[in-house]
Image: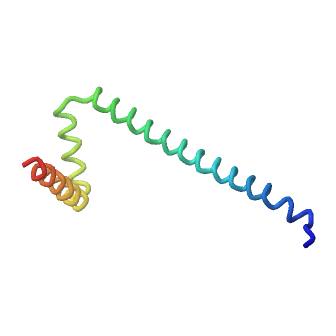
Protein backbone atom coordinates (compact mmCIF):
# COMPACT_ATOMS: atom_id res chain seq x y z
CA UNK A 1 0.00 0.00 0.00
CA UNK A 2 1.47 3.28 -1.08
CA UNK A 3 1.08 6.42 1.05
CA UNK A 4 0.89 9.82 -0.54
CA UNK A 5 2.26 12.96 1.04
CA UNK A 6 -1.29 14.05 1.85
CA UNK A 7 -1.82 10.81 3.81
CA UNK A 8 1.33 11.46 5.80
CA UNK A 9 0.38 15.07 6.54
CA UNK A 10 -3.17 14.23 7.64
CA UNK A 11 -2.27 13.70 11.35
CA UNK A 12 -0.40 17.02 11.39
CA UNK A 13 -3.39 18.76 9.88
CA UNK A 14 -5.72 17.15 12.39
CA UNK A 15 -3.47 18.21 15.27
CA UNK A 16 -3.36 21.77 13.97
CA UNK A 17 -7.15 21.75 13.65
CA UNK A 18 -7.55 20.48 17.21
CA UNK A 19 -5.13 23.12 18.47
CA UNK A 20 -7.10 25.79 16.65
CA UNK A 21 -10.37 24.55 18.12
CA UNK A 22 -8.88 24.45 21.61
CA UNK A 23 -7.65 28.03 21.22
CA UNK A 24 -11.12 29.10 20.09
CA UNK A 25 -12.66 27.51 23.18
CA UNK A 26 -10.06 29.18 25.43
CA UNK A 27 -10.77 32.55 23.79
CA UNK A 28 -14.52 32.13 24.26
CA UNK A 29 -14.15 31.13 27.92
CA UNK A 30 -11.81 34.07 28.52
CA UNK A 31 -14.31 36.44 26.94
CA UNK A 32 -17.20 35.07 29.03
CA UNK A 33 -15.10 35.27 32.21
CA UNK A 34 -14.45 38.92 31.44
CA UNK A 35 -18.17 39.57 31.04
CA UNK A 36 -18.89 37.87 34.38
CA UNK A 37 -16.14 39.88 36.10
CA UNK A 38 -17.52 43.13 34.66
CA UNK A 39 -21.01 42.21 35.88
CA UNK A 40 -19.70 41.55 39.40
CA UNK A 41 -17.84 44.89 39.38
CA UNK A 42 -20.95 46.69 38.20
CA UNK A 43 -23.10 45.02 40.87
CA UNK A 44 -20.57 45.80 43.58
CA UNK A 45 -20.42 49.45 42.52
CA UNK A 46 -24.23 49.66 42.51
CA UNK A 47 -24.53 48.22 46.03
CA UNK A 48 -21.81 50.55 47.33
CA UNK A 49 -23.39 53.65 45.80
CA UNK A 50 -27.05 53.08 46.73
CA UNK A 51 -28.79 52.78 50.05
CA UNK A 52 -31.54 50.26 50.76
CA UNK A 53 -34.35 52.72 50.00
CA UNK A 54 -32.88 53.56 46.59
CA UNK A 55 -32.49 49.85 45.78
CA UNK A 56 -36.11 49.27 46.85
CA UNK A 57 -37.27 52.04 44.51
CA UNK A 58 -35.24 50.53 41.68
CA UNK A 59 -36.80 47.11 42.28
CA UNK A 60 -40.26 48.67 42.40
CA UNK A 61 -39.63 50.43 39.08
CA UNK A 62 -38.43 47.18 37.50
CA UNK A 63 -41.54 45.33 38.71
CA UNK A 64 -43.75 48.06 37.26
CA UNK A 65 -41.86 48.00 33.96
CA UNK A 66 -41.68 44.19 33.66
CA UNK A 67 -44.55 42.70 35.71
CA UNK A 68 -44.63 39.31 33.95
CA UNK A 69 -40.91 38.71 34.31
CA UNK A 70 -41.01 39.88 37.92
CA UNK A 71 -43.80 37.42 38.70
CA UNK A 72 -41.89 34.59 37.03
CA UNK A 73 -38.68 35.49 38.88
CA UNK A 74 -40.60 35.56 42.17
CA UNK A 75 -42.12 32.15 41.51
CA UNK A 76 -38.72 30.64 40.64
CA UNK A 77 -37.09 32.21 43.69
CA UNK A 78 -39.94 30.98 45.91
CA UNK A 79 -39.58 27.47 44.52
CA UNK A 80 -35.86 27.36 45.29
CA UNK A 81 -36.29 28.85 48.77
CA UNK A 82 -39.03 26.31 49.59
CA UNK A 83 -36.91 23.47 48.25
CA UNK A 84 -33.90 24.59 50.29
CA UNK A 85 -36.00 24.85 53.45
CA UNK A 86 -37.55 21.43 52.86
CA UNK A 87 -34.13 19.79 52.39
CA UNK A 88 -32.94 21.20 55.74
CA UNK A 89 -35.92 19.82 57.62
Q: In x, y percent, where is residue 40?
A: 38, 36
Could you say which is closer to the camera, residue 76 or residue 29?
A: 29
Could you say which is closer to the camera, residue 85 or residue 27?
A: 85
Q: Quadrant of residue 13 in the image?
A: bottom right
In the picture as drawn, the residue positioned furthest to the front comes out as: 1
- Location of residue 44 with respect to 59 vertically, above or below: above
Q: Residue at x 23, y 56 (%)?
A: 73
Could you tell whether 82 is left or right of 51 in the image?
A: left
- Location of residue 33 with respect to 5 vertically, above or below: above
Q: In x, y percent, where is residue 16?
A: 75, 52
Could you tell whether 31 is left or right of 76 in the image?
A: right
- Location of residue 56 with respect to 67 vertically, above or below: above
Q: Quadrant of the N terminus?
A: bottom right
Q: In x, y percent, where is residue 29?
A: 53, 46
In the picture as drawn, the residue positioned furthest to the bottom comes out as: 1
Q: Residue at x 60, y 45 (%)?
A: 27
Could you tell whether 61 is left or right of 13 in the image?
A: left
Could you say which is closer to the camera, residue 54 or residue 47?
A: 47
Q: How is the image coloured?
A: rainbow
Q: Residue at x 18, y 32 (%)?
A: 52
Q: Quadrant of residue 47 in the image?
A: top left
Could you say which is closer to the camera, residue 76 or residue 87?
A: 87
Q: In x, y percent, where is residue 60?
A: 18, 46
The image shows a total of numbered marks equal to 0
Q: Residue at x 29, y 26 (%)?
A: 48
In the picture as drawn, the residue positioned furthest to the top comes out as: 48
Amino acid sequence: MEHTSSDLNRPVGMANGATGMAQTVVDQVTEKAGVVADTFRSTTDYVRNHDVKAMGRDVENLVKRYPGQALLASAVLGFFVARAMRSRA
